[in-house]
Image (spheres, coloured by chain):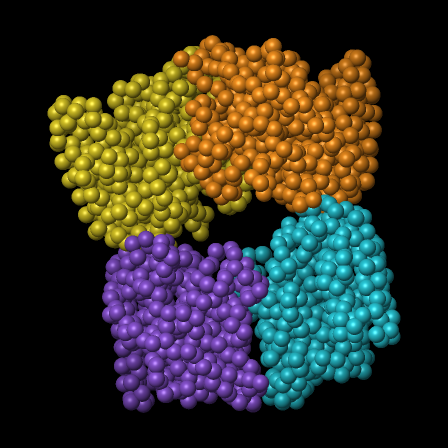
Chain colours: A cyan, B orange, C yellow, D purple
Amino acid sequence: MTSMTDTALVKHFTDVRERTLKLIQPLETEDFIIQSHPDVSPPKWHIAHTTWFFERMILKEFKADYEEFNPVFDFLFNSYYNTIGPYQPRHQRGVLSRPTVEEVISYRASVNEHVLRLLSESREPEIQQEIEQLVNLGLQHEQQHQELILMDVKYNFFVNPLFPTYTKREELPAVGRKESNFIPFEGGLVEIGHNGEGFSFDNERPRHKVWLEPFKLAAKPVTNGEYLAFIEDGGYEKSEYWLSDGWNVVKDNGWKAPLYWMKDEQGNWNIFTLSGIQELHTEEPVSHVSFYEADAFSRWKGKRLPTEAEWEYASQGIAIQGNTMEKEVYHPMPAEGDAQAPLLKMFGDVWEWTASAYSPYPRSKPLEGALGEYNAKFMSNQMVLRGGSCATPASHIRETYRNFFPPDKRWQFGGFRLAEDRE
Amino acid sequence: MTSMTDTALVKHFTDVRERTLKLIQPLETEDFIIQSHPDVSPPKWHIAHTTWFFERMILKEFKADYEEFNPVFDFLFNSYYNTIGPYQPRHQRGVLSRPTVEEVISYRASVNEHVLRLLSESREPEIQQEIEQLVNLGLQHEQQHQELILMDVKYNFFVNPLFPTYTKREELPAVGRKESNFIPFEGGLVEIGHNGEGFSFDNERPRHKVWLEPFKLAAKPVTNGEYLAFIEDGGYEKSEYWLSDGWNVVKDNGWKAPLYWMKDEQGNWNIFTLSGIQELHTEEPVSHVSFYEADAFSRWKGKRLPTEAEWEYASQGIAIQGNTMEKEVYHPMPAEGDAQAPLLKMFGDVWEWTASAYSPYPRSKPLEGALGEYNAKFMSNQMVLRGGSCATPASHIRETYRNFFPPDKRWQFGGFRLAEDRE
Amino acid sequence: MTSMTDTALVKHFTDVRERTLKLIQPLETEDFIIQSHPDVSPPKWHIAHTTWFFERMILKEFKADYEEFNPVFDFLFNSYYNTIGPYQPRHQRGVLSRPTVEEVISYRASVNEHVLRLLSESREPEIQQEIEQLVNLGLQHEQQHQELILMDVKYNFFVNPLFPTYTKREELPAVGRKESNFIPFEGGLVEIGHNGEGFSFDNERPRHKVWLEPFKLAAKPVTNGEYLAFIEDGGYEKSEYWLSDGWNVVKDNGWKAPLYWMKDEQGNWNIFTLSGIQELHTEEPVSHVSFYEADAFSRWKGKRLPTEAEWEYASQGIAIQGNTMEKEVYHPMPAEGDAQAPLLKMFGDVWEWTASAYSPYPRSKPLEGALGEYNAKFMSNQMVLRGGSCATPASHIRETYRNFFPPDKRWQFGGFRLAEDRE
Amino acid sequence: MTSMTDTALVKHFTDVRERTLKLIQPLETEDFIIQSHPDVSPPKWHIAHTTWFFERMILKEFKADYEEFNPVFDFLFNSYYNTIGPYQPRHQRGVLSRPTVEEVISYRASVNEHVLRLLSESREPEIQQEIEQLVNLGLQHEQQHQELILMDVKYNFFVNPLFPTYTKREELPAVGRKESNFIPFEGGLVEIGHNGEGFSFDNERPRHKVWLEPFKLAAKPVTNGEYLAFIEDGGYEKSEYWLSDGWNVVKDNGWKAPLYWMKDEQGNWNIFTLSGIQELHTEEPVSHVSFYEADAFSRWKGKRLPTEAEWEYASQGIAIQGNTMEKEVYHPMPAEGDAQAPLLKMFGDVWEWTASAYSPYPRSKPLEGALGEYNAKFMSNQMVLRGGSCATPASHIRETYRNFFPPDKRWQFGGFRLAEDRE
């Protein structure tokens, strides 16, 4: 038993679990219940599901005589683990008023107490390590849902004509717009993927060789101003920039701009944010675009999206800091003018779409059992995003981290950065 | 100014508005928000919409300098009045967490106060009469939504695997089952429809002549036990009993029994009620069947449904009393064995499907303006039901009252009574 | 055995069956196969199904040792008789290239021969009468499908950008437009329905009493010119004229005019006909409108549609002649200016929507067995039309005939005539 | 002008165009018209579209004063080239009876004549080369549609309860089943992609480096017998083998076996083929499986699918011969027992699903103009297949050829071969 580890883990556990409670403080009871789109989940579901994850994956497996809080919760709060059993259909999470928010908070408290007690008990080192790994996984899982809570509350508030505000925000300092330059990379036979030290998801492993042709990567993400030029040039009306599937999505949904962009009666663009409706700032990174839009913009610009291998290789060695969840801005911010680093904003602000379909790494091995469903089964029809956003906890971001969404999804904080071939 | 009338109206206003608040007392805040089916509405919406009806149809029309509580409410709480303006789509009523329940209750209080003040002011008798008629209409409207609240809460609770309970109920006394007999009527040239004394909806007027062939009407509604025999005889598997549209609905939805019937693992039937899951009582009137099911049962039995003219003619002179909302049972009850009246349970317990499509009476005139949309525009693809249910306020029931639903709807307390031709 | 009847029946059989072949003469083999909308059927299916009707309802029932032409045809060419067995889904009739048209024509010839042989055999009078009634039913059935062939070919040709022509037509004589006047009727206790002499469908029987208030009926159907005024007055943009269901249909389908109306680049209206695209003639009866459009026009005009009882009562004694299928114009024609009859065009030209939902007559009895499915099972969500059209065989029209379509259907030759209450 | 090339090209042009006519010889006129699924096209459309491709891409661009055969054909027979103009929606190709098959054959003859005349004219070498490249592209395009004709006819015939036969086929010789072995490959830094000599599509270029870990590839594709074991082990009922999207497809469509597998009443498996219904041969390669099924089988077997780079690298140097379209078997055949080659059936028989999403090669450049839409715009939500099938012309197959389909499609002749990591 390494009590040092334990102490750090207990603190991490407490911190992450409390952070979730802090995130939901601005919400009214009513806000916890709604699901305004099949892709979003009610906040109540998130706080119950993250708790169920600890109960089901750890307490029920390792705690002798553990009695579940409520046997129906296995049905209500299992997200998608078919090997565990049937579950409430995802698009029907918003039809459930019970358990109440208060009951779910009690559920959290009860599970927290049991997990902490479990961690404090002594046992064989191997088992203890296994438990600690699972607790870490549960916390990484909870951090994913912290970001989802912010994404989902934003969407739920947006569809309400009253446009509720999640948090007040100081007016951001105006920052002079900076032209983006491209940083050259040699490429060659490089290595990407997680080397196994510290936490990583199964989909980031193993570290492996990839051949890269010489390329260049933009110093910073595409901004609202640059994206506006695409719109004003008729980008959403010209099929030649678009993938076939993307063009169908544009036509079927009447897309004319990123999600949350709103044109007022005078023709001025505003953006809905977690701090309400705000003027469009041209120098902020564009956000809430789909892969299809990122891809179409790139083609219009005569550039392309980077592959995830290019992105990761370019990011190697860059410090993980930036506009992350802890800043509590919950909105991408303009790049500062005179930064020293050649690549700006690789971490935080917006997840960056890559040109890479989400697929298994060579020789990868999904986890055993139900947890094997965590990542591997989603490896079709999705694209990889990298880098973390203004809604991602800093401790959740890694240069090897592979986020993924279907190419038409826009409610995540998703932007992009251009790349091009080097002659 | 007839202050007598005023006093009675003020009392009626206060009673009805308070009854709504009494109905929602058992609900948790979370219960107010959900819409588990496009046909149902969140309870919060009902309590706001009934208030909006008074504000929009009366205060804004008759109160000088009235300032609306919140200008967005015209969009949020207009149900379907196209002539007033655009509104939140019906199937999207459940995506709105704000305004909160508390704010909506304040809205009620504010509008109540203004309406009472308006009623107390003196003005020209004609205007006063118009206002009083509209207040009466608003209260009849609110009573319709009282029944809808009960219907919708029942449905919302049913889709939740926790099966919440709205109200506790004493075990009902077991009552010996009584065979139904048929009561003969002569028919001929009869009159139906409202004669204009007291309140009526525009769709009940004018009183008019109808020719009826001699017929018989069952002394009481079809019971669960009788309906069970239809099920056990393969009624849901034999197309020959069903209208073509009805058969498609049965196949598409996999119907095998009325809504809320649940077969347990031992093969016993239970029913979900507002008091939770209960054993099926064979002598209770069957409820929550669609027109298609009522019609199919009738054909299986070699009988038919009565027309609305037959039903109304037969009901003339019967006292309006029975198992209505005020009994707070919220569930149909068995017929008492030795009742004197030849026709039992014409009012209360279950709405009774008729064979009549919902269409305008000869020489009928819808109300002017937006209120013309109240009834008339729904006169296609709907069938008439008569008599009121265990969820209908007694003061809302009339022998001329025409309730209507599309033939496939089952979440209302809808049963039926058989008829046959007299030789 | 009454050989007179036989001879007439044999001639009628031969005439009707040959008329179908005449109707399909203008078609290419390719035209027989397509189904451009779930509501229409491929012409090949019509000529096979009408044959199957004789084979299945008569030959298989009454002809000893009859061997069916092809056992799979029971599946392929049963339309909707669930009591007979499963069948090719209606919307999938157009995915079948085999049997070829040639094979289906052979099938017709074979069944014709067997039917004629059956009719020529001597047997007990009762059986013989039953067979003759069924042959008559089969011929009335075939006449319905003759009209359907014209309706369906018209629709199939319309969706083809080449706009094929079914038949050439002489330019119609220009006819001076005549204002419509209203003819008064007393009403009272009248009788409608078929009295049982000669052929009738089960849905037309029995003759029965109906009470009618005094009313007036327009002398002729509403014309294209009158309907155009409704369009130009914004009829399709103003919700107040429309039933709620109808308004949804208008919005969902973007209706701006009747089916087959086409606005050219200069803003002139043309109409697609079975003789190709033609200029809109303002004095022709408007056709290819839904019940919703007929109803909305009436409300806009301050009138109403007649009930089917009013229509039938008014038509009693009028000779059945007019612009019917035999004229081979296949398009409604203007009313002649100086006609003697007070009511013009009651029969032929366009089916006329009534205000009556399609429901069973008092004391009606559907046929026994599979044929009971012929009419009765469609008695929900449909409206009655009366009078026959330019695509209806004259010998198929009766003043008691009840045609019916769902209120949103427009591909039949459906127009309407106004009515109003008499003061 | 290199007349040698011309002569070969003229012969190739004539051969390919005639082969299409040979392929449609067994069809009845009716068979040309139907579209039994949105994914399939009527054979008439294929023979018109391939002709339109030559007319639109070559004759209209290079032939002075060329008058198009019919101006509406640009709308009717454009497949998906948005930059050319609007077109008949894909799922509506089967609603068009006109132009007739005969007219389309005339269209072919006319365009053929013009193309041959164009090729025979002398002009500047650069332009001549451009034309020849486009003619070659048009022929490769036509060969793709030859395979599509066979795929689509097969599907159209399968949905017809008469199960028509496209071609008679001799009973295949029974062949002893051979266990599959795995062939080891070193991998390392290899090259794949087309080097630009001879014809290739833009999506196969440029040749580029890829790093491969050591791997093994199965000597032959998975057989019906092996796949049957997966079915019998409950493969279609166990979610753990399936990608999440795949599992949804399985449940939504009720898949229990590959497309065209039919279980008879005795529980024996048969397969529908272009030669009718035949007994399942266990030693034939399994065909008509989706990517999801191939992937699930691999996981069940403890193996995986090869990447397209592994597949292409392993295929380098293997002669392109096998069971291709010219054999006129149109069905995959068992592997011969004692073949010398270590890898059997890499070309012909069945297209082989790979683990690779369809995405652009490094530094790839789509064609200019409308032809840039040929391949590049489909690079999302599709998986790569390699090797050609029994319905692919031999001259159309290359080791670098990238076929692609969405992961749920099964109507192509799609099978797969297993791979595994080398320790």
> Percent from the top left, x then y, of residue A101?
78, 49
Q: Is residue D117 above or below residue A148?
A: below
Q: Is residue D250 visible?
A: yes
Q: Is residue B230 above or below residue A327?
A: above
In this rendering, position of residue D3 left or right of residue B47: left
Q: Nearer the viewer, residue C122 or B152?
A: C122
> Percent from the top left, x then y, of residue C99?
26, 52
Circle count:
0
Q: Nearer the viewer, residue B12 or D227?
A: D227
Q: Quadrant of residue A356?
A: bottom right
Which quarter of the rendering shows the C terminus of chain A?
Answer: bottom right
In this rendering, position of residue B151 left or right of residue D226: right
In this rendering, position of residue D154 left or right of residue A23: left
Q: Quadrant of residue D317?
A: bottom left
Q: Quadrant of residue A412?
A: bottom right
> Percent from the top left, x then y, of residue D107?
28, 66
State the residue at coordinates (27%, 77%).
D14
Q: Is residue B406 visible?
A: no
State the residue at coordinates (39%, 41%).
C411
> Percent from the top left, x then y, of residue A413?
71, 65
State the residue at coordinates (84%, 74%).
A1
Q: Nearer the viewer, residue C355 or B269?
A: B269
State the residue at coordinates (64%, 70%).
A368
In this rendering, position of residue B13 left or right of residue D127: right
Q: Is residue D175 above or below residue B245?
A: below
